[in-house]
Image (tube, rainbow, N blue to C red):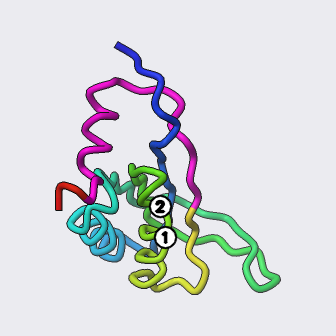
Amino acid sequence: MLFTGMNNELIIFVTASGNEEASRIASALVEERLAACVNIVSNIESVYRWQGKVTLDTETLMIIKTTDERYAELERRIKELHTYTTPEIVALKIERGSKGYLDWLRESTSEENV
């Protein structure tokens, strides 16, 4: 059963220098209920312009599921934990998803359940 979300649920993309950093950040976000789940995708290739130069790096991608209410605190916490000066933090609204999953996502990030 597909469910149109409350337009409150988010997927956030964050790159990290490697698996160790991604695991450390992911664990903190889930433990602190800032994220319901973080998928870690190893060995992505990133091409980007930084300080006037085109750079090619191998990074690790975190795919983070959270809610709009938790976003500001999640962003603040990522910046505290991340080694990058300017970490990539890009949020997209979840338009549709299974009702059970979206209910679980909201419950898992609810401050009421702390």
Q: Is residue 107 magenta?
A: yes
User: What element does badge 2 sit on?
Assistant: helix
Bin the neighbour count of mark 2 within 10 Å (Cα to Cα): few under 14, some 14-19, many 20 and up: some
Taking the spot 47% from the left edge, 61% from the top edge, the residue there is: 71
For the N terminus, the quadrant is: top left
- Vertical comparison of 90 with 76: above or below: above
Q: Alpha carbon of mark 1 to alpha carbon of mark 2: how far?
A: 6 Å
Question: What is the span of residues highlighted in magenta in the rendered image?
Answer: 90-111
For the C terminus, the quadrant is: bottom left
Residue hosting label 2: 71
Taking the spot 55% from the left edge, 42% from the top edge, the residue there is: 93
Which of 16 and 12 lies nearest the eye of the viewer? 12
Marks 1/2 in contact by CB < 8 Å: the verdict is: yes
Q: Position of residue 27 (x, y in %)?
A: 24, 68
- Vertical comparison of 2 with 76: above or below: above
Q: Position of residue 58 (x, y in %)?
A: 51, 68
Q: Is residue 44 magenta?
A: no
Q: Position of residue 12 (x, y in %)?
A: 49, 54
* 10 displayed left or right of 29: right
- Name the image quarter holding residue 73: bottom left
Which of 14 and 1 lies nearest the eye of the viewer? 1
Instruction: Give amino acid for label 1.
Output: Glu
Q: Position of residue 57 (x, y in %)?
A: 57, 71
Bin the neighbour count of mark 1 within 10 Å (Cα to Cα): few under 14, some 14-19, many 20 and up: some
Taking the spot 27% from the left edge, 59% from the top edge, the residue there is: 111
Q: Residue furthest left?
A: 114
